[in-house]
Image (tube, rainbow, N blue to C red):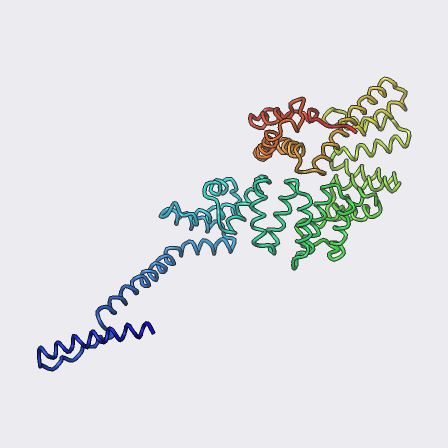
Amino acid sequence: MRGRFRLSGLLCCLDGVMSAETSAASTPPRPRRTVRRGSPIRRLLSVLIGIPVITGALLLGWLWWAERPLKAVERSLTQGDFRTALERVENYLKGDPASSRALDLKAQSLVGLRRFPDALAIYERIGSDTVSGQRAWGEALLRMQRWTDALPLLRQVHQKQPDNADVTHELAACAMQAGEFEQAVELAGQLAKLPGQRERGLLLLGVLHSNHGNYRLASEAFGQLLESNPDGAGLQILPEELFQGMGQACLNDGKPEEAIRHLTRAIELRPTAERYAFLGEARELQGDLAQAGEAWKQGIARDPDLARAREGLARVALDERQPSQAIEWLQPLSVPSKLTSSIAHTLKRANSLLGDKAAADRWDAEETRLRDAEERKRALDDVVKQAPQSFWALALRAHKYASEGNRQQAATLLRTVDGLRTQKPDGYKDPQGFLNQLIDAVQTGSPLPSLDLVPLERK
């Protein structure tokens, strides 16, 4: 209704004006002009609307043309032609050296060419927001043994590509090296469930359990693999390596017959000194010392310094009441760098049988010293296995990395350890200053402190 009232008032006003004009002049009214559709206003609007559309189309066309070289780089990467990819992207960077996309593709090319430090120099400067770039970045860190740096990147990629078998495998291996054993096992199980990846996942699972000392679970995983692939063909390792792994797992799990079967098969494919040594131990566990001795002699023929075989032959000599022969077998191993408590024990027995009490007492003291050191090492290893993210587990893993020459990774872990200590200064007792000595050694490259300085509560 309000609209009608307003319209009526407007019409009345117009009528009054028109009446006045009619009385003032008797000339007939001019015909009303009609606004044509092609008026200047409409044409102007059409032009204004068309300009951004045309500009956008031109811009998209220019971008498509400008990025054609980068598309070619991506095709080369997909085809595995990393050298061509690198040549193309370097040519592109001559004209646009700040292009983050081109630099990312260059880093991916460098990873494909196994130039990992060069790739990391790029990624640590510009990063990457692409899945392919993050994966290449993670792989470079993995290859440089920077496990704790690679782990979060590979986790991001795995979240985006949970069905990517290669990513799952790399993440599992990285998790194991970073002390995340449970996650590594879980990922290996996931890998085994992916289409066409069952054998690959079982192999990884067996290796993980074997390296962690879970020999029964390792033999179960290897056994399932061999059920579907009895020849061990088409795997990431050679068949003889699979049979050796299965044989060692069975040996350590107390199953000599199975160990002998698999180790014999490994030797048939490619005989090595180490495989003969393990076969000798399996024969000894079975109770066949004669066959054990033959296997160990085969091993020594290939490697005269093979400690396992020499120890085994010394035990056979003692069983045959030949102590002088036992001492002769162990002579190359009686130096400090090779000596173990078991060698010292055998030498003690041999000298005791020879009636040399002084020598027997000397080896008895050495056996006690070495056994204490070995028990301490096992206790420290248990700390790392049972509580991998604890304060001392991180410190011990840093010491291990540094002792293997990976001081950069050791330094990364030590920053975490030092941060924990700063947050809780009275929570981690270190009376002999092991941690401070370790940090200094890693920073300066000086010799590492002895693990004897690590505070360890004895039960």
| Quarter of the rendering occupied by the C terminus | top right
Residue 282: x percent and y percent? 83, 42
Vertical comparison of 49 with 299: above or below:
below
Question: Closer to the camera, 193 or 244?
Answer: 193
Residue 316: x percent and y percent? 86, 33
Vertical comparison of 433 with 304: above or below:
above
Vertical comparison of 79 with 215: above or below:
below
Vertical comparison of 368 with 150: above or below:
above
The structure residue drawn at horizontal position 66% and vertical position 59%, both measured from the top left corner, is 196
Question: Closer to the camera, 63 or 18?
Answer: 18
Question: Closer to the camera, 168 or 44?
Answer: 44
**Number of marks in picture:** 0
The structure residue drawn at horizontal position 74% and vertical position 45%, both measured from the top left corner, is 245
Q: Identify the image quadrant of residue 161.
A: bottom right
In the visual, does 50 lie left or right of 176?
left
Residue 406: x percent and y percent? 59, 34
Q: Is residue 73 visible?
A: yes
Q: Is residue 332 visible?
A: no
Question: Closer to the camera, 389 or 119?
Answer: 389
The structure residue drawn at horizontal position 75% and vertical position 34%, both measured from the top left corner, is 306
Residue 400: x percent and y percent? 65, 33
| Quarter of the rendering occupied by the N terminus | bottom left
